[in-house]
Image: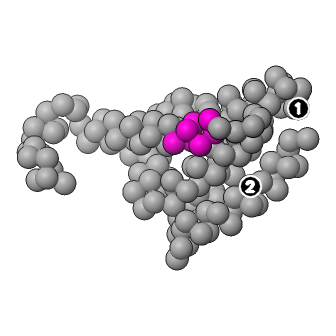
């Protein structure tokens, strides 16, 4: 890939303290892209719950891509460590889930006290389902099927 850009490995590493900081920059950019795709998918939703569902579906479809699975789901914890991954996730995935749940709570569909717990339940669900679907022989189809189960979970969590 470096050959395509015309940049040497040394020139690339010159901009980063070490390989971990390079990986962190890649992870941050990818998380930003995932959040942008989820926000775009949610933009046309009719209500906050539909927006949350659309964002979840977007994430599952994106996580079906091998590079997303490898960087976000497999390598992130071991390369940047759990704490740094969590900080990044708080800004993007978990942060967006919390925003969606806050909008749902503002519409008096769930109590405010449930936002934090529901956000963590939903994040854990989305990550595990993404792992499962990304290893399927047909990840996009598996993601569409998995979203049906996520919808069933959301139907239980949200009135």
Q: Nearer the viewer, residue 137 or 80?
A: 137
Disc 1 on helix, strand or loop?
A: loop
Residue at point 70%, 39% (across, down): 45
**Is the residue 51 above or below the residue 64 in the image?**
above
Q: Find the magenta span and give its range.
A: 37-43
Residue at point 85%, 26% (across, down): 107
Residue 41 in the figure: left or right of residue 125: left
Q: Nearer the viewer, residue 15 or 56?
A: 56
Residue 38 belongs to magenta span: yes
The answer to whether mark 1 and mark 2 are in CB contact below 8 A is no
Q: Quarter of the image containing the N terminus?
A: bottom left
Residue 56 belongs to magenta span: no
Which residue corresponds to mark 1?
109
Q: Quadrant of residue 22?
A: top left
Residue 50 percent location from the top left of the image: 74, 42
Measure the C-alpha gap from mark 1 to mark 2: 18 Å
Question: Is any part of residue 74 visible from this angle?
Answer: no
Sequence-first tag of 1 and 2: 1
Question: Is any part of residue 99 visible from this angle?
Answer: yes
Which residue corresponds to mark 2?
150
Residue 120 percent location from the top left of the image: 70, 40
Residue 19 in the figure: left or right of residue 136: left
């Amino acid at each position: 890939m470096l050959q395509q850009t015309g940049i040497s490995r040394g020139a690339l590493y010159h901009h980063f303290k070490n390989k971990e900081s390079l990986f962190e920059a890649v992870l941050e950019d990818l998380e930003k892209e995932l959040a942008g795709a989820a926000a775009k998918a949610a933009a046309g939703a009719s209500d906050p719950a539909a927006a949350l569902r659309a964002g979840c579906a977007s994430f599952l479809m994106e996580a079906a891509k091998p590079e997303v699975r490898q960087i976000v789901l497999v390598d992130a914890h071991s390369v940047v460590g759990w704490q740094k991954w969590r900080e990044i996730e708080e800004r993007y995935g978990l942060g967006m889930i919390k925003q969606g749940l806050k909008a749902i709570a503002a519409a008096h569909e769930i109590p405010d006290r449930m936002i934090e717990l529901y956000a963590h339940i939903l994040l854990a669900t989305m990550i595990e389902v993404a792992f499962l679907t990304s290893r399927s022989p047909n990840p996009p189809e598996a993601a569409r099927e998995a979203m049906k189960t996520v919808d069933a979970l959301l139907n239980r969590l949200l009135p």
